[in-house]
Image (cartoon, coloured by chain):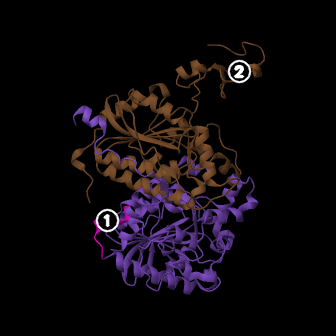
Amino acid sequence: MRLRMPFGRRKELPSHLWTQCPDCGEMLFNKQLTRNMNVCTKCDHHFKIGARERIDLLVDKASFEEHDAELVSGDPLGFVDSKPYPQRIESARLRSGARDAVITGSALIAHDPVEIAVMDFDFIGGSMGSVVGEKITRAAERALAAQAPLVIVSASGGARMQEGTLALMQMAKILGALGRLGDAGIPYISVLTDPTTGGVLASYASLGDVILAEPKALIGFSGARVTDQTIGERLPAGFQRAEFVMAHGFVDQVVPRAQLKERIAFFLGALRPRADLRWSL
Amino acid sequence: MKELGTLLGTRSPAEGNGQVPSDGYLIVDSKELGSARVSAWEAVKLARDIHRPHALDLIERIFTRFQELHGDRSFRDDPAIVGGIAELDGRPVVVVAQQKGASTEENIQRNFGMPHPEGYRKAIRLYRLAERFHLPLITLIDTPGAYPGPEAEERGQAEAIAKSIDTMTRLRTPIVAVVAGEGGSGGALALGVGDVVLALENAIYSVISPEGAAAILWRTASEAERAANALRLAGPDLLELGIVDGLIPEPKGGAHNDHDATAANVKAAIVAQLDRLTRLTVPDLLVARYERFRRFGVVIEPAGEAAPPRHAWWKRVLGR
């Protein structure tokens, strides 16, 4: 649908009705954008979406039951940058309505019970601190107890600086729990969305039994800016995009948002939990 | 049981994490340092001192008959990670370490201690070797971070680090990890999942370099000193946060002043820990290692919230 500047000058368009696609410049009618799963109708640009919207897209209607919703972060370091860390969390909460950067729960995907964790880039860049670490670890432990597959949808800039080395330790904590899950023969599907970088990619996001990515999602260990500065090299076009990462062998498939649910459902159907491999020492 | 206080959270922050008994070789309470405690920025400078003993300096003094093993068996040998089999007081062990250079020339060859993915894949190969023959694993951490260049991205830096951490979480042999100098983020943690994690007194361990944090938080790298303080990355901070179980004392003024004395202290600490760990069965080790990392993080859970249901509702619905 072509609606480029239908009422004259672009800046006069009421922004609550229209969104401009950052990729192709097309003016998109918000209602239609939402109906199209926040994918540009002209160029298929995948807009970032929040965790709640993502859950609605992926799980069977009304099947989601949230866990650990009340968990909030402490301030272990007494961290202050331009503002104290507790204030930063509070303003992120007021802005996004979420308590931290991940929502976890039980749900059905195409009638199959799963544990699911969905990250939200809108909350301090989707950064992984104690709450993200704890909620994802609990999700993995619940999946193990219930013998249900685990689905994690990542969207994160990496570990949360304001929690220092404790944030780093979340990587080992989560991988410990995912390791037990894998040893027990319970599938874990990792979905990488724009962006998945840093400590999140260098831990659970990279170790799914199946790893799916959304088209053109930024996926990389270090941000392109860091690489640029450290190395002083210009990076090739498409560097660290989902298709590039798949071509280099670290993602199984690039899946458009509209097909994501059915694709996950296919893998869940094929990879059944192996009850005979219960975790044991 | 020593671990119980840790699990119940009854220990005080100043007691380290209470996992390691004070045996004279280790500082397990940051108060012991007293006025000798250096500022975070001092620690950053000491940890990065080019004359500080690097991995091979320590390895040749701690172990006998070190035989280096090269290569990841799929791409190349990464000189930023060294590893091999050696003897510690006559007992065979596997050692894996990050290697910085002591000169510009050597640093270029060692890539300033910044491993490529193949370095981590070599580490994983050696971890598996240790497991197969049930040799204790000793790791020495000293890296500014994993190499962030484009070729490292293309070869899967993130996957290599993730797999290395993952392998260590369930490796069926005792692991002692020592932060010897700079513990730079995920690239350091890839060698850092130990049953016991120790640090030299002036070592640092951080989620991001102080310069990197300053550039993001204050938009200028010159605030690095402020960032170093805020990140609580120095040895005593790590002890108070429970990240490390004990600090290994350094000679007066820092490890660079006396490589022999530093290595002797590291050796004594490793030997004492291995004596303890090798008495434990593998299942006990793995449970304790899981719990050691499981409890990291400070979360507030409002009282009175229902525990997660034992059986999710869909199980009742589906009659499973």
Q: Is residue B93 above or below residue B303?
A: below
In magenta segment, residue B288: yes
Q: Is residue B231 above or below residue A6?
A: below
Secondary structure, mark 2, is loop
Pick whichever, A233 or A162, lies toward us.
Answer: A162
Secondary structure, mark 1, is helix
Q: Is residue A151 above or below residue A257?
A: below
The quadrant of the image that shows the C terminus of chain B is: top left
Q: Is residue B115 visible?
A: no
Q: Mostly what secondary structure, the magenta segment? A: helix
Q: Is residue B187 visible?
A: yes
User: Do marks 1 and 2 share a chain?
Assistant: no
Residue A189, quarter of picture: top left
In magenta segment, residue A95: no
The image's mark for residue B132 is: 1
The x and y percentages for residue A216 are 57, 33
Q: Which residues are magenta?
A: B279-290
Q: Which residue is mark 2?
A: A14
The quadrant of the image that shows the N terminus of chain B is: bottom left
Q: Colour of chain A?
A: brown
Chain the render paints purple = B
**Which residue is at a point 32% across and 44% down the rendered structure image?**
B309
| Relative side of B3 to A73, left or right | left
Amino acid beneath label 1: Arg
